[in-house]
Amino acid sequence: MSQSATDAARRGGELKERIRAADHAYYVLDQPVLSDAEYDRLMRELAALEAAHPELADPDSPTQRVSGAPAARFERVAHREPMLSLGNVQTDAELDELDARVHRLLGLPESVEVAYVCEPKLDGLSAELVYEDGAFVSGSTRGDGAYGEDVTRNLRTVGGLQANRGVPQRLAGRPPRRIEVRGEVLLQKRHFEAMNQLILRQGGVPFANPRNAAAGSLRQLDWRITATRPLSFIAYEALVPHGEPWGTHWEKLRALAALGFDTNPENALCHGIAEVKRYRDRMERRRFELPYDTDGVVVKVDDLDWRRRLGAASKFPRWAAAFKYPPQEEATRVRAIWASVGRTGILTPVVEVDPVQLSGATVSRATLHNEDEMRRKDIRQGDWVLIRRAGEVIPEVVKPLPERRTGAETFFEFPRHCPICGAAVVREEGEKVYRCTGAACPAQLQGRLRHFAQRRAMDVDGLGDKLCAQLVETGLVKDFADLYAITHERWEGLERMAEKSAQNMVDALERSKDTTLRRLLFGLGIPQVGEATAATLARHFGTVATFLAASEEELLAVRDIGPESAREIRAWTSEPQNVRVVERLLAAGVAPAPEEVDARGALAGKTVVLTGGLSRLSRDEAKAEIERRGGKVSGSVSRKTHLVVAGEEAGSKLEKARALGVRVIGEEEFLALLEE
Ligand code: IVH
């Protein structure tokens, strides 16, 4: 063997090993070790190497098979038709080539415009759902394409983009005898953020991205855990054995929607490859506005007859391809790391980097969640790092590039004193975070004001970050109550405040006084009191005074309040300063309406789950009615559920209720109950 051939064999072996390890980490452990861009680079290098050295050809090479072997902990299910993956195209020239090949293989003259359906390439994991006689009988992951993992129970709990959609237990309309529906299971960005926040608060290791979170959530051995994760299923393909009843993919998508699936509202029928390119440009621009992650656009020949004639090569169909967006990662240098102080006094490391272009925006800052993450990832000042924009505005630091270190890098020591107010910074035992102890810290005050003013709390229209900062800097506001004492003239005296905006602020504050107890309690930023707890407390205590007077024992007696919450809430209400602020808010005219509850109401102490659509009242109205009668509305059915109200097209929750023997009533019965 020549020298270059041995080198190629060695490099090929290395590449295969790295790719296999990365596949295992990604598909089986849901903890990726490479960025998508790095993975693609390795794959391309291996493919090029194999092309140049045919003697390396190996049917087991990662270039020859679909990744993602099914994990042994699940039953294996065979896909009747293999689940293929898609070939990549990256440039306009490659798109033109695709179109030219379609023309050539079908014997079409150039003048004929081929219709393509374009769909966002959803960045989740694909799943196949099998329906027989309209009933959902089995569901699986893609696995290695031939065999997937049986996750039927888990899939039953998966929702849709809209609350009342998702994985139907029964198909609507007139479904074929057997139909295999394929689509993507994903976690919407807002759900992903919320889930990671929760994990961080509990001191856990957050998921790297929504895809991993979705995969980890679906591939749970206990389907009840999956049920707690707000996953969505979007359908994009369907197969019917022995003759599909549709002529085009576009018709198929419409049929899927009629059967009860969510299909992507962004899908479009494009005539000719030029329209495809315009669609791709539009999607790439809008990419970060979409509620879920996408990593490209899927282009599919619309005519199903043509598809059959085009067929598939070993791994990819010839009738479809994925246009992948350029990677959203960039390498840049860390200029400095510093600690920013939030509303609760928590210090978060902020990484300042040399500005780089990332998906159309100039980026000069990236976040690390806490000191542990900084240490775990080993990020130093002066380091070259990889940063990634995963949909949020502020990118995250993926990892350092240690091979580029010069030795001049320095560790960032967390400050012992708050960089804003100078008070001591402490990291309490068992805590993941450092906290500023300054009671009057301006950074904390600014964060608290924002929290107080936000829509879900006191809803003070127009009181954004910049204005809050000004109020604190000018000393106009030292606590929430000061807000209501600011006169029109004072507002007008602030920077960039015209007469009209000053009046708007006065009006907005006036409007915010008409509020509810739950909004006020949430807005005050009491430790452990999120929106849900605020609602519970408001329902339980009814008035501010009763709440402030409650002892730790009385708090502990409230449903859903644990010992730690009771202690922290009581600590807050025993602080005279806090009580004084609340009293001044009330004196200024803030009038929190009690959440009306009837302790002897028809639903007192009952947990109710709403599923499906109601025709005579909205979900929010139904929820309010239940709460007014002393009941609590929960999002998922468990053994603790007392009652399930099932409306139109009730889905998996209804199934679960039946399985657990929970009482189920329909809309009419529910309305009658409200009349009682
Ligand atoms: S069609 C052979 N449509 O991309 C047809 N796939 O690389 C393959 N994907 O495993 C499926 N969005 O997880 C199709 N609108 C879409 C898609 C999509 C995302 C994923 C899917 C598949 C992978 C193929």
Image (cartoon, rainbow, N blue to C red):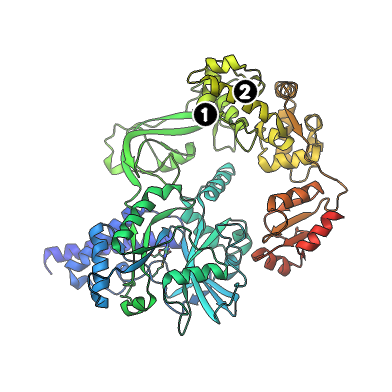
> Residue 574: where, in percent of width, then height?
75, 26
Q: Quadrant of residue 570?
A: top right
Q: Quadrant of residue 105?
A: bottom left
Helix, strand or loop status at disc 2: helix
Q: Quadrant of ligand 1?
A: bottom left
> Residue 123: where, in percent of width, then height?
43, 57
Q: Is residue 260 visible?
A: yes
Circle nearer the viewer, 2 or 1: 2
Instruction: Judge whether 478 appears above or below 412 on screen.
Output: above
Instruction: Judge whether 601 appears above or below 299 on screen.
Output: above
Residue at the bottom extreme? Answer: 242
Q: Check if mark 2's residue and mark 1's residue have beta carbons within 8 Å.
A: no
Left or right: residue 499 versus residue 109 is right
- Identify the residue at image location x=35%, y=48%: 328
Left or right: residue 197 versus residue 248 is right
CA–CA distance in space, label 2 to label 1: 17 Å
Three-letter code, disc 2: Val
Q: Residues within 10 Å of mark 2 (few under 14, many from 20)?
A: some
Dot label at residue 653: none
Left or right: residue 613 versus residue 126 is right
> Residue 92: where, in percent of width, then height?
25, 57
Q: Earlier in the sequence, mark 2 or mark 1?
A: 1
Q: Is residue 442 visible?
A: no
Residue at the front extreme? Answer: 111
> Residue 73: where, in percent of width, then height?
53, 68
Q: Which residue is mark 2?
A: 506
Dot label at residue 465: 1
Residue at the left extreme? Answer: 2
- Identify the residue at image location x=24%, y=65%: 47
Three-letter code, disc 1: Asp
- Identify the residue at image location x=25%, y=72%: 103
Instruction: Judge whether 584 appears above or below 400 on screen.
Output: above
